[in-house]
Image (spheres, rainbow, N blue to C red):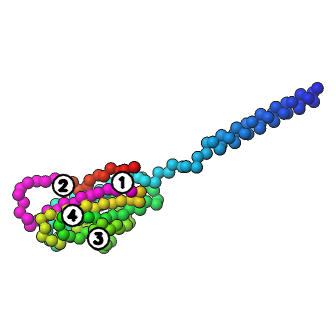
Amino acid sequence: MNILNNKNKRKSIFKALALCLFAAVSLTFVSCDDDMDIQQSYPFTVETMPVPNKVSKGQTVEIRCELKKTGDFANTLYTIRYFQFEGDGTLKMDNGITFLPNDRYLLENEKFRLYYTAQGDDEAHNFIVVVEDNFSNSYELEFDFNNRNVKDDGAISVVPIGNFKPLTR
């Protein structure tokens, strides 16, 4: 009878171990998730130093910019483009690249300088600079320069040098 009790104990222990092993394997497969949530897209802004609000024909204005990111993902690429909607002038990057309107250019550094040169005697020179990343986040800067040679009527106008565009998801 002792032999039967030992066999029953062994079977019970074996069944308990098999059940524990099965439960551990089942929980392992259930808890695994192939979809890891790795954040790749981070919002950013572009800060600029103050710039003059008047420019005359042939004068160049330096615009110092810095990309401020809330996070960093190694494969994020930033591009820059501009569109001039009033006046006549050229915009250059500190590495010598002269921008063509609405063409995208790779932004290689977080700190960069833009140089706007007024080429006309227009009353105003207005353009937008857009910095975008490869995750469809963008930030717009609007620059408004009045012609230094045009008589001022005495009115003071406030011109924002950076407009925040909210991120769309």
Sequence order check, earlier mark of 2 and 1: 1
SS for callout 3: loop
Q: Nearer the viewer, residue 60 or 105?
A: 105
Disc 1 element: strand
Q: What residue is shown with label 3?
A: 100
User: Are the residues at dot 3 and dot 4 in contact (C-beta closer than 8 Å)?
Assistant: no
* Mark 2 or mark 3: whose residue is earlier in sequence: 3
The residue wearing badge 1 is 44
Pointer 4: residues within 10 angstroms few (<14), some, or many (20+)?
few
Q: Quadrant of residue 76?
A: bottom left
Q: Which residue is mark 2?
A: 159
Q: Amino acid at mark 3?
A: Leu
Crowding at dot 2, Cα within 10 Å, few <14 / some 14-19 / many 20+, comes out as few
Q: Which percent across, then down, holds residue 74?
A: 46, 59
Report the Cα–Cα distance between label 1 and label 3: 24 Å
Name the residue located 21 percent from the left edge and 63 percent from the top edge. Answer: 85
Query: Which amino acid, mark 4?
Result: Phe
Label 3 – label 4 distance at C-alpha: 13 Å
User: Which amino acid does the dot numbered 1 rest on?
Assistant: Phe
